[in-house]
Amino acid sequence: MDAFVVDGEGGERPGVSAVWPSSELTTASRSSVTRMDSPPANAILVPMREDFTPARQKSPHARTKPHDRSGIAAAAGVATPVAATAAKTKPDLELTKVTQPPASAKAGGTFIVKVKVNNRGERAGKGLIKMALQGGPKPYGLPRNIARIKTGNVRGLTFKRYTIRLTVPLDQGKGSYRLRTCLKATGAEQCRSSRRIAVSAA
C-alpha cells in the first residue's frame, strides 16, 4: 500500500504523525496538508522525532536489564564483597591471656608467666611482647623493661602460647610493683597489668 506521512504538530497529539493511505490524498492535498485534526479511520498513528523520522518503540515483550546497584551500595557505605574479603585477610593479633606473677619475689630472682596471643585475621602476623615492672619507690609509675619477646609468625585464625621466664633485676629497689605486659602488633598497643608483686632485697 502506498502511504503518505502527515505531520501531527499542532494536532490533538503533538509529536505523533499519521500514515495516510495514498488513496485518501490527491496530489494537491499532499502539498497542502500540514496538520492532522481528524485523520481517517484507516490512518496509522506513528510517534515521530523532530526530524520526522519514526521514533523507535520498545516491544512490550522486550526484556529489560536489571539495574546496576553497585554504585548505590558504594555511595551508601555498604561494604562490597571484595572489600569485606580484604578486611578479613588482614592479621589481627590480640593479647588474650597473661597469668599472674607470684605475690613476692627477690631482686635477682626469677619467676614464670604464661601469655596467650590470638590472631583473629586470616593472614599470618607478627608482634612483639614487652614486659616491665611498674611502681615501687620514686619515680612512681616509671616502668622498667625486663623482657622483650618476638611472637614469631602467628597463623591466621589460630593462637600461640608463650612460657616466659622473667628475672627481677639485681638492683631493683625494694617495694611493691605491678607486671605490665604489652603486645605491639597491628593497630594500637595492647597492655595488661598484673596484681602487685612485693620485691625484697636479694
Image (spheres, rainbow, N blue to C red):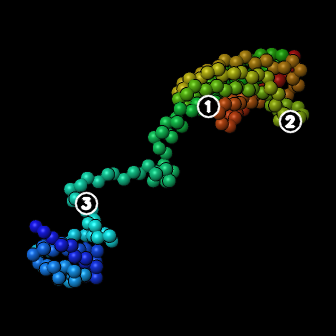
> Which quadrant of the structure image shows residue 97?
top right
Asked which secondary structure carries label 1, the reply is strand
Residue at image x 84%, y 33%? 142
Sequence-first tag of 1 and 2: 1
- Amino acid type at image mark 2: Tyr
Do the numbered discs 1 and 2 sit on residues whose CB atoms are within 8 Å?
no
> Which circle marks residue 83 in the picture?
none
- 98 or 40, nearer to the observer: 40
Q: Nearer the viewer, mark 1 or mark 2?
A: 1
Q: Amino acid at mark 1?
A: Glu
Residue with the mark numbered 1? 94
Q: Tell me the CA gap for discs 3 and 1.
A: 60 Å
Mark 3 is surrounded, within 10 Å at the Cα level, by few (under 14), some (14 to 19) or many (20 or more) other residues, namely few
Of pointers 3 and 1, the one earlier in the residue sequence: 3
Q: Nearer the viewer, residue 184 or 175?
A: 184
Residue 46 vertical placement versus 195 (above, below): below
Note whether 18 is above or below 55 in the view shown: below
Q: Residue at x 15, y 70 (%)?
A: 3
Give the total number of marks visible in the rendering.
3
Q: Give, as a three-letter code, the residue at label 3.
A: Lys
Q: Distance between the Cα atoms at labels 3 and 2?
A: 83 Å
Which residue corresponds to mark 3? 58
Residue, far front:
27
Q: Is residue 53 above or below residue 121?
A: below
The residue that mark 2 highlights is 140
Image location of residue 147, percent across then percent down: 76, 22
Q: Position of residue 198 (x, y in %)?
A: 80, 26
Mark 3 or mark 2, which has the lower sequence index?
3
